[in-house]
Amino acid sequence: MLIQENHILEDRKDSTIDHIINSIRSLLKGDLLSIDENSEQLFYEYIKLSHIDSSAFSYNWPYIVQATRGNGFYYQKNKSIVYFYFRESSNNPQRHTLVVVNHLGQDSEASVCEISEAAKKLNVMSVIKNIDKDKILLWEKFGYKETTESWSQYSFRDDNTCPEFVYNIKNFINFEFSRRTKSIIKKISKENNYTLTTYDHSFKNCGLNLLEKNSEYLESKGVDFKKEVVFAHQFVFDENIKNKSVFAVLEDDKLIAVSYLTHVGDNLFFNAIINEKKPNLMRFLLWKSVMHYCDSLKEEQRPLYLALQGSENDGQNKWKFFFNPIRTIQRTHVTNK
């Protein structure tokens, strides 16, 4: 009975979003389409056309799939493209917010404004994520302001709450971290015999079980809602994503973690780690996965930089900092609410 009720609720949600999309589409001059398995190539074509900080975390395709929760759309007009989804209000299921997670190409800000204004006519407000701090004044001229309302009870501005970190890959390989981080990695390396292998479909059920346990643990710690953790990591199991490197981490043939990386040009983006609850395992696997990936390449093929997503809280931010980033990227949210 509960499963049937959940299906009914999902059908109602999809029906509401379909109505919003069709209404917005009628007000636009460009093409508004659902993200599908053919969208990845188009995204990277726009990356090449755009003047961007290529180490910023929103410039890899798995991030777009993750950020739109696998139910995203894009608006394409002239030489610009906007990626977005609809976020349901936690205290009012009838209300949605249009959330732009990325925009690329020439004069893409104009396309963001166009779609936001169309949504506003339907009483749907917009939040634009991943805005560089030095562009806040530009967005204010367009009628937007930096958000003051918390994204959720767990974070102020989702993964823009804390800065993104960029690391020098050579420094990473040479183990140039804080003393405590080096000590943790050496200790775990000495006491455990973890092996990494290429992830394939045979690991999926165990991987999903890991995600279920991990999401329950994070909710119990007050990090995030269980369902949000699950939704945020479904992209790991999306077989349509082409440009990716996914590793299964084994201990005596038992899957204890899945790590996910994306190599784009000079940058290696670390998208996710799903792991068993063991002290400091995540930070060890961050190092181990990067080393494993780089060891598989000739030196001239290796990326120059490692990019980590911004954190939602100070705890996540702190351990990433101890890997000694060479710079940070501070981004924010703006809204027309």
Image: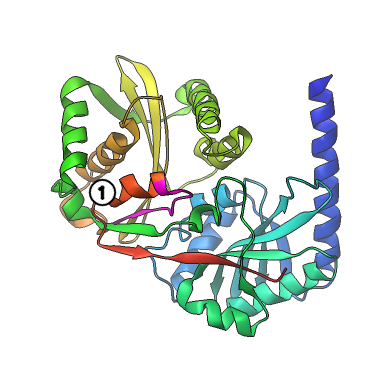
Where is residue 322 drawn, in percent x and y?
26, 48
Magenta residues?
306-314
User: Which residue does the numbered mark 1 point to in the structure image?
Assistant: 322
Where is residue 323 drawn, in percent x and y?
25, 49
Taking the view exactly as shown, the residue that stands out farthest to the bottom is 141
Residue pictured at 18% horizontal, 48% vertical: 177
Where is residue 143 drawn, in percent x and y?
68, 80
Front residue (pair 287, 75): 287
Crowd class of label 1 (few under 14; some 14 to 19; many from 20; radius 10 Å): some
Task: Give the quadrant of residue 111.
Answer: bottom right
- Residue 180 visible within the image: yes
Front residue (pair 175, 30): 175
Taking the view exactly as shown, the residue that stands out farthest to the left is 174
Left or right of 190: which side holds 79? right
Q: In the rendered picture of this protein, how many numbered marks are placed on residues?
A: 1
Q: In what quadrant of the picture does the N terminus appear?
A: top right
